[in-house]
Amino acid sequence: MLQVKDLIVCFGPAVILEKINLYVGEGEVVGVLGPNGAGKTTLLSAISGILKYTHSKIVRLSGEIRFRDEQIDNLTAEEIARRGLILCPGKRPFREMTVIENLRVGGFLCRSKEEFKRNLETVFNLFPILKSRAKQVAGTLSGGEQQMLTIAMALMAKPKLLCIDEPSAGLAPLVRKTVFEKLKQLSKQEGVSILLAEQDARLALSISDRSYVLSSGKIVAEGTREELLKNDVVRSSYLGL
Ligand SMILES: Nc1ncnc2c1ncn2[C@@H]1O[C@H](COP(=O)(O)OP(=O)(O)O)[C@@H](O)[C@H]1O
Ligand SMILES: [Mg+2]
């Protein structure tokens, strides 16, 4: 459903992503693993189209990105979102707004009240805690609840492919596990394909069908959990496991 071909991203003279080739199949959960600075956020920004709006005028991008048999690298971020490729950024929800107000922002693509209600129901089924906190101001939620709200905002746009950036960031180990279980549930129950950028390799491997290992802007390994863990160099040098 997603194909990235020979993607190169440069910020001025610095090459940030070097000839990235990857794909996500229908219904797959695919990990992009790598430490801080590897280029994960840049990759998701390029795919979802938001890299075009960076303040820096010196971004250069080449290669081809296709989504559901259509070239998308020349489309705006909104056009890409309308096709069902939704980015869940590594950011928290709007703190001063309530849970439901945040979900309304996430649901900006809904074409009718009925569609909004349907999406809201799906989201509340997956995250019942958000239903009981609907009128609570987002800044007063726990870290884990805020992360779930961020994911829920993306789900309000009914993604076919969810590109999610570092869902474990800033969360305690137990809460991380809960969030990742939700992602797994989302892929199994709703059939959403997921491209998961993540530093916590162990956790990401536990829910991914396949993964790519990104190091300094290059893909240095790819495979299933078993294949990657079998390789001692990958395991110790790149995944820290
Ligand atoms: N707007 C920008 N201008 C210049 N360099 C950037 C910009 N954004 C990110 N970078 C650089 O790109 C590299 C990859 O960053 P990033 O994609 O955020 O990695 P990750 O998400 O894996 O931590 C880093 O070296 C970072 O300093
Ligand atoms: Mg990042």
Image (cartoon, grey):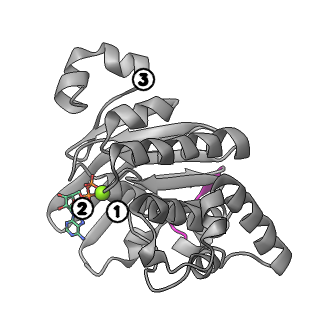
Asked if the stretch drawn in magenta spans residue 128, the answer is no
Which mark lies nearer to you, 3 or 1? Answer: 3
Q: Quadrant of ligand 1?
A: bottom left
Residue at point 39%, 78% (across, down): 53
Q: CA distance from mark 1 to mark 2?
A: 7 Å
Toward the left, the furthest residue is 13
Residue at point 61%, 45% (across, down): 193
Residue 225: numbered disc: 3
Between 206 and 68, the one nearer to me in the picture:
206
Task: Kindly report the secondary structure that dominates the magenta region of the rendered protein.
Answer: loop
- Which amino acid type is shown beneath numbered disc 3? Arg
Residue 61: numbered disc: 1
For the N terminus, the quadrant is: top right
What's drawn in magenta, residue-wise? 69-76
Residue 151 vs 175, above or below: the answer is below
Report the residue marked by disc 2: 10
Residue 156, image x, y percentages: 66, 67
Question: Is residue 9 among what the camera can see?
Answer: yes
Residue 72, image x, y percentages: 56, 61
Residue at point 48%, 76% (across, down): 138
Category of crowding for the residue at label 2, using alpha-carbon neighbours closer than 10 angstroms: few (below 14), some (14–19), many (at least 20): some
Q: CA distance from mark 3 to mark 1?
A: 30 Å
Q: CA distance from mark 3 to mark 2?
A: 30 Å
Residue 74, image x, y percentages: 51, 67
Q: Earlier in the sequence, mark 3 or mark 2?
A: 2
Residue at point 69%, 61% (across, down): 124
Q: Quadrant of residue 106?
A: bottom right
Question: Is residue 73 among what the camera can see?
Answer: no
- Which amino acid type is shown beneath numbered disc 2? Cys
Category of crowding for the residue at label 3, using alpha-carbon neighbours closer than 10 angstroms: few (below 14), some (14–19), many (at least 20): some
Category of crowding for the residue at label 1, using alpha-carbon neighbours closer than 10 angstroms: few (below 14), some (14–19), many (at least 20): some
